[in-house]
Image (tube, rainbow, N blue to C red):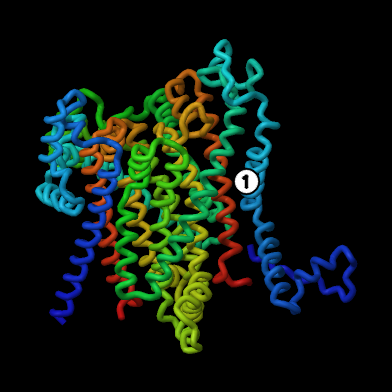
Amino acid sequence: MTRSVTPQMTTAPTKKFRLRHWLLTDSPASRRQARFSAWYRSWLAFRANPMAMLGLVILVGLLFIAASAPLLAPQDPLSQDLAARLSPPGTNGYLLGSDSLGRDILSRLIYGSRITLYIVSLVALTAPVAGLFVGTVAGYLGGWVDVILMRITDIFLAFPRLVLALAFVSALGAGIENAVLAIALTAWPPYARIARAETLTFRHADFIHVVRLQGAGSLRIITRHIWPLCISSLVVRVTLDMAGIILTAAGLGFLGLGAQPPSPEWGAMISAGRKFILDHWWVATMPGLAIFLVSLAFNLLGDGLRDVLDPKKSER
Amino acid sequence: MVVQRFGAVCNTLLTVLITMTGLLFVTFIIGRVMPIDPVLSIVGESASRATYEAAYHEMGLDKPLLVQFLYFLRDIARGDFGESLLTARPVFEDLMRVFPATLELATMGTVIGVLIGVPLGVIAAVKQGTWVDHLARITALIGYSMPVFWIGLIGLLVFYGKLGWIGGPGRLDIFYVDTVPAVTGMILIDSLLAGDMDVFANGLSHIVLPAGLLAYYSLAYISRMTRSFMLEQLQQEYIITARVKGLSESAVIRRHAFANVRVPLITVIALSYAGLLEGSVLTETIFAWPGIGSYITTALLSADMNAVLGGTVVVGLVFVCLNIFSDLLHRFFDPRTKQ
């Protein structure tokens, strides 16, 4: 964890190491070089964490699988073969077995990865940003702004996530987009609360006073000085939530309210296999394993990112 | 001094009131946006035009939205959530019946989660980078990555179906149901009050798997957050001061580092508890646990709007109370939030 990166101190770097030398210099010539250098050092630290790398590899693999699903899938995910229904793994040419309609489970898992990635990226791009903004503004400005924003947060936080998703789905019609909308609407308040709690602990800190005396406005203080300090807690929470988002979406699919059949969504596949669990364990187990693997990858990645992104961690 | 304290109490009460009104308003709006006609669900599909109109007026649906909202508030203040279409009983009664089941499950899950999660997080932070830390990390990661409905199914299959070690779905075996008087509605407590150890043991064998699963989820979250908070504190300079001063390592950790972790940890535990209370929908579905989560889900699937709105309001109110409680504790423990 604590290995430090020593720059190459050769006086005349060979061509191969020139870029590396430029990145690892102790005296960057420009702001751009300093920034790239910081990124590169973060990457080196991240690369030293095998568990985080494992998570990254799984997710890159997932991206690759999702992108080239038509090339990788041995069969059409929707084509049925009732004669070969419920084939155990490895028989009849089904590597992971077939489901109750004789569809290839492996092919369905491969196509299902697209749905999973779609859901995750939509939620992850919206909810944390909104939460960070609301939480830091409320915490820093205080007073009635704090009261109003936190009451709104509490109201939204007070809604059971799955129940709100259920309500949305019945109001707008079942489907992935509505599920995502509901998840995002219920996902931001925890970020807001955490960001506010962090902000409260240093809103009276000396360095904030100093910046303010130098003439910085509230917006600048919040975005430049408070946000970076909130990031570390938020990153832990967001990556934990990435997995949570996948699980919630799969849960909606399991209850029959997310992706609709015959869509190869993983949660819906578990639900379909629930009836056969006693005699045909693979139908429900395989998609469960897929969900588990992807959630785990996000968690591993988040853990590694936490170690790297935490600016408060001293480099000893 | 007294006046100041009185002012603070008033302030808190006002806050609670505003939050709850907001919550009720959002619930009300969701109820109105729903594409389910509340009149049709009362008079039935085959009612004549005149009957429909009469019921429409009687329910006040022709009034302005604000007036309708006030009616809604009045009914709720009376504890009148309407009647459930599914059970043909007042929703309020239904909720009082199902809520203790959820409370029992979530409380048990949280207690186990805190008892294991907090020490695990502290140890992992103190022994950062050792095998203990890695073990704690992997335990938490696996817990956090597992779909609860999937692992619940497999747990039932293995421990109930194949091994027969635990009770199956539901809160009690069928021949124990209603054998102890319902005082609190929580089987474990009721059976202890009645002194019936058979029922207690049976209830325990039913709750152990779902509560264990929920506990695993909450301990995964709690231990990770504890570790994160602890690491942050252990890097502070006051820790060095304490060590230089000659304090023993355990005193440094307990009296200095952990004392500062306690405050943010309260928020985390409250959030996690509330999460278990509201989010055990899937667990309850898998284990046929007759709690508030499965009540709302069943109601939604059969378009029973009164039950859904009533359930949402109750869950929301419980959540608001928990949050305010955690806020108060926060204020009580953290000198920095005092001006």
Relative to residue A262, is residue B273 depicted above or below? Answer: below
Q: Please, which residue is most extreme toward the front here?
A: B49
- Along the horizontal axis of the image, is B18 left or right of A67? left
Q: Give the image location of residue A13, x and y in percent.
A: 88, 70
* Quadrant in which the C terminus of chain A is drawn: bottom right
Residue visible at 50% across and 70% down? A227
- Along the horizontal axis of the image, is A13 left or right of A34? right
Q: Give the image location of residue A238, x and y in percent.
A: 49, 55
- Along the horizontal axis of the image, is A163 left or right of A178? left
Relative to residue A304, is residue B328 depicted above or below? Answer: below
Residue visible at 68% across and 71% down? A35
Residue visible at 29% across and 40% down? B34
Residue nearest the observer in this picture, B114 or B300: B300
Residue nearest the observer in this picture, B9 or B84: B84
Q: Give the image location of residue B155, x and y in percent.
A: 42, 32
Examine the image and state in which quarter residue B178 appears: top left
* Quadrant in which the N terminus of chain A is drawn: bottom right
Q: Please, which residue is most extreme toward the top here?
A: A83
Mark 1 lies on residue: A59
Q: Give the image location of residue A108, x and y in percent.
A: 58, 29
In this orientation, does residue B204 appear? Answer: no
- Along the horizontal axis of the image, is B230 left or right of A312? left
In this orientation, does residue A28 appear? Answer: yes
The residue type indicated by label 1 comes to: Leu
